[in-house]
Amino acid sequence: MKGNEAAVRGAIAAQCRAFFGYPITPQNEVPEYMSKYMPEAGGVFIQAESEVAAINMVYGAACAGVRAMTSSSSPGVSLKMEGISYIAGAQLPCVVMNVQRGGPGLGNIAPSQSDYFQAVKGGGHGDYKLLTVAPWSVPEMFHLTALAFDLADKYRNPAMVLSDAIIGQMLEPVELPEEIDVNIPEKPWATNGAKGRERNFITSLYIVAEDLEEINHQIQAKYAAACRDEVRWEEYQTDDADIVLVAYGSTARICRTTMNLARAKGLKVGLFRPISLFPFPANQLAALARSGKRFLVAELSAGQMVEDVRLAVNGAAQVDFYGRLGGMTMTPPEVLEQVEKLMARTVYPGFTQAVVDSRLVDGNGSTGPSATDSVRINTLGATSEAGGGSDAAGL
Amino acid sequence: MQQVFSRPKALADVGMAYCSGCTHGILHRLVAEVIDELELLERTICVCPVGCSVFMYEYMNCDSIEAAHGRAPAVATGVKRVLPGRVVFTYQGDGDLAAIGAAEIVHAAARGENISVIFINNTTYGMTGGQMAPTTIPGQETTTTPGGRNVATAGNPIRVCELLSSLDGVAYLERTTVTSPKGVVNTKRAIKKAFTMQLQGKGFSLVEVLSTCPTQWGMTPLDAMKHVDNVMVPYYPLGEYSRKE
């Protein structure tokens, strides 16, 4: 089945009983399948008048104590950001899926990973984060969507399934489990009628700054707990690797093939795949950095997750980047070419590359950095200072 | 001694932060009386707006949800659809309902969502300092229409009941005032009718109450009441606008 259908089935298996959506390519199969399966499961489906209304219907259903979800693609997810911020502020659980497409603006309907920042850094206003998971296969669209509901309930915070047009539209065999473990906690805070108890109210409004600071501390404490308990990742052949590819979602699938191609040529290449993007597997990457690995981060973006990789290794390893933009995808040989170029380059231990280059520049070529250039770049540590002859030319 | 008047159970025993002459207090009480009389306190969910009544959840003893500006009908939809046995109402001002939330109210009405809406129309943004609202009357001075609302540049007001009356999902629409005891009694009847329609599963109901904002209008409470009767009622005629029974 398609990734989008698997996500729907995962949500229903996780006892999601309310879906509110709006049509946008490439996620249309989600509301379409939801309109069929959700009523069969005894749940509520509404095609809302807008993305804004859809996320606010999710807010209402979440207030009532029901597992609720919406899905969209990049421009639509931007519209939902107001509601997502309110849901995070009111400390409610819900699941939002983003089947990412090319941006910015209307962009196109081709696969992209350029909404990483929006997903893992907040996206809407205020200090909040989305518990974000990134499926790389159709089976994971099922399982990680189901997991997202447990995460959302456990932390009373919106969870994001960050997919893309490849994973959403791809057909793969999926073994659907008869039933899955579902952990739905009691929800004594729900506004479902004040019968036999004091009235509940749900709000993100705290007009007294001291009160709001306290709420923010509560929210941040949840994120600290999630960073301790909810980090998920996968490693392939990183033990003996000289270069570790770091990629998530569809790009990780591509990079796994790159890794196999490289190994066939005798190149020691591994793959590190973050599954949870927030919390990010920073400690695991830092450990690899301390063991002397170099990293090549590959994304369908101008370089977003690479910033988290650089923060994770904190200067302990060289981190390079390769990205395709605007809905273009990369092929395994294309990534391999970048690996081979990287291997031919001089390594300067202890320095991360300070320039975010959307395409690697050949280290031996005329536009590549000389030893002096590289040291200068890393010492000054700013793109604007990198100047001619550095990777900044690639921008 | 027989007690003939007391605080409704649905109304919290706290002071309200509204200005003198503001009609929010009257309307909160009327809603609370209706909840009491229909014995709905244990199964009513109030969806509060952004505006002066943003703290309505502090004043009501029923379960309440604070919605984003304009989104109350969508939030109420989410609650009502998953809890069809509960009574769900929104309480929204004119900026909330007819400007930033215009899409949400129109589509909740078009879907025939079985919710009730108490719509407070005082022709201005009270909380933010008296700016032009979608219902500001032509010529009315506000902080963003300093020479009076010029429809050539600032557009025309929206008559919400008339607008929604074309929609098949609507069960009940009525416009009232609370400028006199007669108006108060009539408004309570309308609110009770809206809640009753919801209990009967009839669909979307809305009561628009022409209300005062003496502070932002720069009037005394008494003059504000007269302004409603003399200026607003001619522009926003009172009465029922429902198309179907």
Image (cartoon, rainbow, N blue to C red):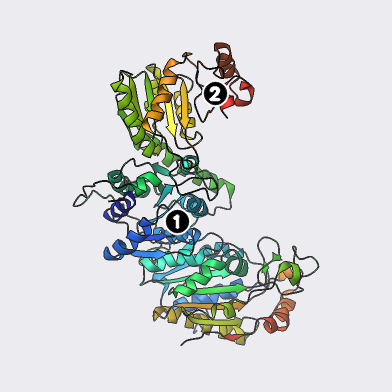
Left or right: residue A289 versus residue A369 is left
Check the image and name the residue furthest to the top. Answer: A372
Per the rendering, the mark at residue A289 is: none
Q: Residue at image x 51%, y 61%?
A: B67
Q: Residue at image x 54%, y 11%?
A: A371
Q: Position of residue A187 (x, y in %)?
A: 35, 56
Figure disc tally:
2
Task: Look at label 2 and name its amino acid.
Answer: Ala
Per the rendering, the mark at residue A24 is: 1
* Residue position for label 2: A354
Q: Residue at image x 32%, y 51%?
A: A7
Q: Residue under mark 2: which chain is it in?
A: A
Residue B109 seen anywhere in this rendered image of the structure: yes
Q: How many neighbours does mark 1 have within 10 angstroms: few (below 14), some (14-19), or many (20 or more)?
A: some
Residue A161 seen anywhere in this rendered image of the structure: no
Q: Nearer the viewer, residue B44 or A389?
A: A389
Q: Position of residue A126 (x, y in %)?
A: 54, 46
Task: Look at label 1 and name its amino acid.
Answer: Ile
